[in-house]
C-alpha cells in the first residue's frame, strides 16, 4: 500500500504528485494540501484508489488503472 496523509506543499508553487507508480496494494490519499495542485497520473494500482479531504481535489493528468474501486475525490481518476 501507498498512503499519503497530511502532506503539505509549502513552497509558493508546490504541488503534491503521485505519478507513474506501480502500487501492489491500495493508494490512499487523505488530508493533503498543495498550493498549486494534487496530481494523480499514470499509476497502476492493484487494489483500490481512495481519496478524501485533499485540498485542492486531486487532478488527473493521464490514465490510472485500478484493480478494485476508485472512491471519494479520486472516483473519476480512472481511465485514459
Image (cartoon, rainbow, N blue to C red):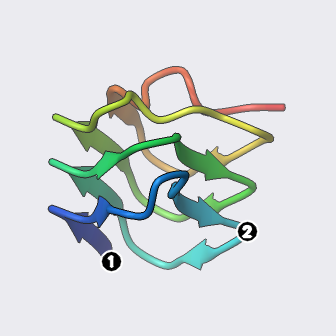
Q: Is residue 67 left or right of residue 20?
A: left
Q: Tell which circle, 1 or 2, labels the residue nearer the N-terminal end.
A: 1
Q: Is residue 70 left or right of residue 37?
A: left
Q: Secondary structure at mark 2?
A: loop
Query: In terms of depth relative to the viewer, which is nearer, 18 or 34?
Result: 34
Q: Residue at x 43, y 24 (%)?
A: 75
Q: Are marks 1 and 2 in contact (CB under 8 Å)?
A: no
Q: Residue at x 58, y 31 (%)?
A: 77
Q: Residue at x 29, y 40 (%)?
A: 51
| Residue 56, image quadrant | top left
Residue identified by numbered label 1: 1
Residue identified by numbered label 2: 20
User: Vertically, is 7 above or below 34?
Assistant: below
Q: Is residue 69 left or right of residue 71?
A: right
Q: Residue at x 57, y 32 (%)?
A: 59
User: Vertically, is 59 above or below 20?
Assistant: above
| Label 2 Cα neighbours within 10 Å, binned few <14 / some 14-19 / many ≥20 | some
Q: Residue furthest top?
A: 76
| Label 1 Cα neighbours within 10 Å, binned few <14 / some 14-19 / many ≥20 | few
The x and y percentages for residue 60 are: 66, 34
Which quarter of the image is occupied by the C terminus? top right
The x and y percentages for residue 46 are: 52, 64
The x and y percentages for residue 73 are: 34, 26
Which quarter of the image is occupied by the N terminus? bottom left
The x and y percentages for residue 55 are: 29, 33
Amino acid at each position: 500500500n501507498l498512503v499519503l496523509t497530511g502532506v503539505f506543499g509549502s513552497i509558493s508553487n508546490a504541488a503534491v504528485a503521485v505519478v507513474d507508480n506501480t502500487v501492489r496494494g491500495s493508494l490512499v490519499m487523505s488530508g493533503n494540501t498543495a498550493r498549486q495542485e494534487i496530481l494523480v497520473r499514470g499509476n497502476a494500482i492493484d487494489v483500490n484508489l481512495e481519496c478524501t479531504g485533499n485540498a485542492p481535489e486531486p487532478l488527473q493528468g493521464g490514465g490510472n488503472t485500478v484493480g478494485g474501486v476508485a472512491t471519494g475525490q479520486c472516483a473519476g481518476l480512472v481511465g485514459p
